[in-house]
Image: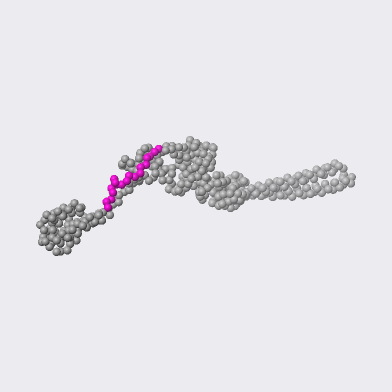
């Protein structure tokens, strides 16, 4: 008798052929038990070989039939449940709720005030000690304006002071002699009074000359351009040698704390209050959201716009005048807010899977909190939605 074949018979005809050749019947353990019973019945009905072959064949068939239940239990592959057999995902009921209406506007990083370093006298700018970006302190000399006429006037007043001093010294000497002769009875009282008056006039002339010289010196000192506050120099555009006029700005210096200044229409600013929390995106729309309070709402309305300052202590002051995105609370409204995980995006279009079956395209906007979106269209209050179904894997 030949050894058992490695290839299992795949049909009833193959099994009968094997039985007629006198070989041991091989039962396919991968076939269902009903099919194996049909094979066994057909083998019993077919004409058998010699008695020796029948005994060997019976022993082999008995061994295979005994191992069939164990083989069928161990080798049966696990079936993957279909999508219908999987447990249903948790549904979410879309409801309309009251949310704070946030208006996007553009804000400018600046300081609460701006100081102008101006020339107090006219003349020529002979020195400029700073340039844009330098940090200065209040009272620091930023530049010098010189007027030659003021120097000449100061020299003339100095000469007048010297003359007045000489006149005052002579008057004091005359007063001393006259007083001595008056005590000896040489001069009358009237002469003494006349000399005392001349001495007082000389002292007055000396004081006036000194005051005029001091005023001229102060006028020359006002040629120094002083910083109005401690901060950063933003502008210093006047070149050396320029002729400047009194009151002309030479440099612009930041003053006060760093703020974000925004403007919005007066009709929408009614709900804006000092202390209201706003959202800012200093790094662009894709950057992190920073929350800060409103420090002041200015009462004046200019061209229909209301100006407000927002605390910007946590932002960088490297670029004054940089514009960033700001979202201000301007009231309340009704909106449908759902978790972001219920939205799937394909080819730039957002979809939501409904619990009753199928998907619907929707238009979304950022929600009030992280991980939420606002449904602008495509969904109504009361709709039940479920998370999107993951795409099936391609066969290996």
Residue at image point 51% right, 50% down = 316
Task: Assess whether residue 117 is covered by the magenta stretch.
Answer: no
**x, y percent for residue 81:** 28, 49
Q: Is residue 232 left or right of residue 359?
A: right
**x, y percent for residue 203:** 77, 46
Q: Is residue 38 left or right of residue 308?
A: left
Residue at image point 33% right, 43% down = 353
Q: Main secondary structure of the magenta part?
A: loop
Asked whether 165 or 369 is in front, the reply is 369
Q: Is residue 147 left or right of residue 329?
A: right
**x, y percent for residue 254:** 55, 47
| Residue 278 in view, yes or no | yes
Asked whether 386 or 48 is in front, the reply is 48
| Residue at the extreme right | 185
Quadrant for the C terminus, please: bottom left
**x, y percent for residue 215:** 68, 46
Q: Is residue 217 left or right of residue 395?
A: right
Residues shaded magenta: 78-96
Asked whether 284 or 133 is in front, the reply is 284
Number of dots carrying numbers: 0
Quadrant for the N terminus, please: bottom left
């Amino acid at each position: 008798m030949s050894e058992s074949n490695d290839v299992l018979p795949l049909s009833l005809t193959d099994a009968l052929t094997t039985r007629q050749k006198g070989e041991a019947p091989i039962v396919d353990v991968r076939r269902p038990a009903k099919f194996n019973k049909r094979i066994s019945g057909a083998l019993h009905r077919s004409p058998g070989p010699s008695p020796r072959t029948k005994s060997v064949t019976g022993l082999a068939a008995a061994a295979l039939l005994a191992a069939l239940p164990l083989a069928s239990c161990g080798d049966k592959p696990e079936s993957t449940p279909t999508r219908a057999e999987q447990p249903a995902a948790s549904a979410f009921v879309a409801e309309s709720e009251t949310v704070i209406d946030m208006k996007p506007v553009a804000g400018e990083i600046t300081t609460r005030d701006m100081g102008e370093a101006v020339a107090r006298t006219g003349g020529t700018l002979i020195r400029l000690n700073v340039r844009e970006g330098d940090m200065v302190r209040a009272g620091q000399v930023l530049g010098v304006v010189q007027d030659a006429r003021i120097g000449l006037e100061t020299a003339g007043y100095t000469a007048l002071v010297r003359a007045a001093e000489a006149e005052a010294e002579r008057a004091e000497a005359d007063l001393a002699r006259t007083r001595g002769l008056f005590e000896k009875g040489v001069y009358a009282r009237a002469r003494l009074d006349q000399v005392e008056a001349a001495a007082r006039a000389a002292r007055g002339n000396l004081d006036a000359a000194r005051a005029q010289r001091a005023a001229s010196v102060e006028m020359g000192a006002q040629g120094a351009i002083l910083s109005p506050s401690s901060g950063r120099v933003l502008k210093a555009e006047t070149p050396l040698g320029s002729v400047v006029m009194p009151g002309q700005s030479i440099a612009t210096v930041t003053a006060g704390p760093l703020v974000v200044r925004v403007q919005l229409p007066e009709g929408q600013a009614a709900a804006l209050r000092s202390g209201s929390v706003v959202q800012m995106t200093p790094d662009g729309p894709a950057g992190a959201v920073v929350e800060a309070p409103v420090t002041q709402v200015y009462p004046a309305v200019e061209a229909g716009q209301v100006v407000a300052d927002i605390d910007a202590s946590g932002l960088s002051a490297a670029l004054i005048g940089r514009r960033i995105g700001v979202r201000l609370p301007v009231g309340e409204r009704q909106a449908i807010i759902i978790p972001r995980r219920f939205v799937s995006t394909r080819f730039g279009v957002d979809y939501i899977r409904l619990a009753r079956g199928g998907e619907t395209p929707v238009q979304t906007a950022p929600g009030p909190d992280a991980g939420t979106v606002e449904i602008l269209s495509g969904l109504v209050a009361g709709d039940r939605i479920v998370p999107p179904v993951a795409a099936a894997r391609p066969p290996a």
